[in-house]
Amino acid sequence: MTKIQKILTLGFLITIAALVYVESTKPVPLSWFPSYSNEDKIPYGSYVLFDLLQDTFKNKLEEVNLPPFEMLKDTSFYGTYLFINNTVNFDKSELEKLLAWTEKGNTLFVSANYHSEALLDSLKMKTSAAFLFSNFETRALLNLVNKKLTSSTPFLLNKEVPILYFKEIDTAKTTVLGVTQVFNDTLTISKPKVNFIRMPIGKGLLYLHNQPEIFTNYFILTENNIEHTQNVLSYLNNNTTIYWDNHYKTGKKTSKSPLYLLFANKHLKWGYYFVLLGSILFILFEGKRKQKPIPIVVPLTNKTYEYTQTIAGMYLEKKEHLEIAKKQIALFFEFIRTRLRLPTEHINQRFFEALASRSNSSVEDVKSIFLSIENIQKKPTISKEELLVLYQKINHFKTKVDGTSTNK
């Protein structure tokens, strides 16, 4: 890496580190997620309500994490079943079990902006949304109709929320408990819309409520709104166990992957990004294969030919023709063993025939060569002419084998 590349990389890393620091120290924005979970302290969580219920009902408050269909299989399950969420969508079979359970003398309380269609159809009810044509804001005014629980001034839910009311109800069986209206600059409900009702189901009671935001941390901790929440829940004070549903909760806890746990914490998240970015930069700049230049090695030259010439010259100068002939004979025998794959231990007629067939020579030519070899091996000295004749015969033989002359 060059000096300029190192400076640029260092500057880039410092910039990234500064961005990570700024981002990690920035205040976390307030979440308005409609959780309704009793573990969440965000505005639309229900941590405060659950804490108040625990103080009020003590050991008569229990959490239920199973779906109603599974929970109602328990024959000892008796009391008040409390559902609070933005949407509570029972399916048909689940609803039938819940209504059958209510008929036995239990209480079913459901607070939601959007109720199950199966529930509304079963009770022959319809809901509708309230709004003002002159104002796009939909802040809710809320009050109860019971003279002991009503307030002289309606309670204001000072936040943009959907305002749902019961457009059609069975007035012969249904008791209206609470009303609502879109806030229009005055704390007065002049055109009340029904948003809280009670209906007998066999020996039990069904409560339907249309503004679950009154059970959130935000509403309860704003001014004296807790009074309205307490008045709504006062209908549940029947000395039975209250079962708090955790299944129908938008913010219910589920099993998360390790990466989710990293991203849930801003410091861990930016630390993860920093490590990931650093790894990428390392691969880009340092991942290239580094190796010293490989020197060129000149292969050793074959000096055998020059060496042979030198030794042959020495023998010729000393006129040691017999020694040269012996070397030629030895090399010739080696040639037969390696090239023609014939053993040379036994020189006989069978050997001559085999050698002739493998060398494209006649048996007479082969015998002539070996006759010359035998004569030379018997003599104490030979002349230059005899050495030359031996050489020519061997060379002629090798030429027939591979088609080229040889100087071996």
Image (cartoon, rainbow, N blue to C red):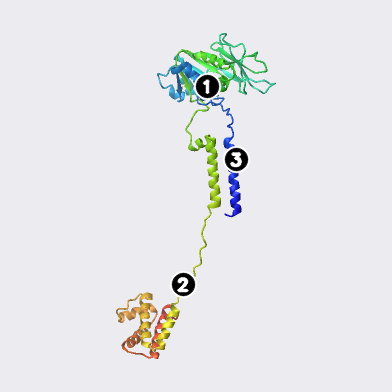
**Sequence-wise first label, 1 or 3:** 3
Q: CA distance from mark 2 to mark 1?
A: 91 Å
Q: Residue at x 48, y 34 (%)?
A: 256
Amino acid type of the residue that numbered disc 3 sits on in the rendered structure:
Leu
* Image mark for residue 334: none
Q: CA distance from mark 3 to mark 2?
A: 62 Å
Residue receiving disc 2: 300
Residue receiving disc 3: 19
Q: Residues within 10 Å of mark 3 (few under 14, many from 20)?
A: few
Amino acid type of the residue that numbered disc 1 sits on in the rendered structure:
Val
Residue 28 location, quadrant: top right
Q: Pinpoint residue 6: horizontal percent, then vertical percent.
A: 58, 51
Q: Quadrant of the C terminus?
A: bottom left
Residue 288 vertical placement versus 194 (above, below)? below
Q: Residue at x 53, y 47 (%)?
A: 279
Q: Of helix, strand and loop, which one carries label 3?
A: helix
Q: Quadrant of the N terminus?
A: bottom right
Q: Of helix, strand and loop, which one carries label 2?
A: loop
Residue at far right of view: 134
Q: Pinpoint residue 309: horizontal percent, then vertical percent.
A: 44, 82
Q: Pinpoint residue 329: horizontal percent, then vertical percent.
A: 36, 82
Q: Is residue 53 visible?
A: yes
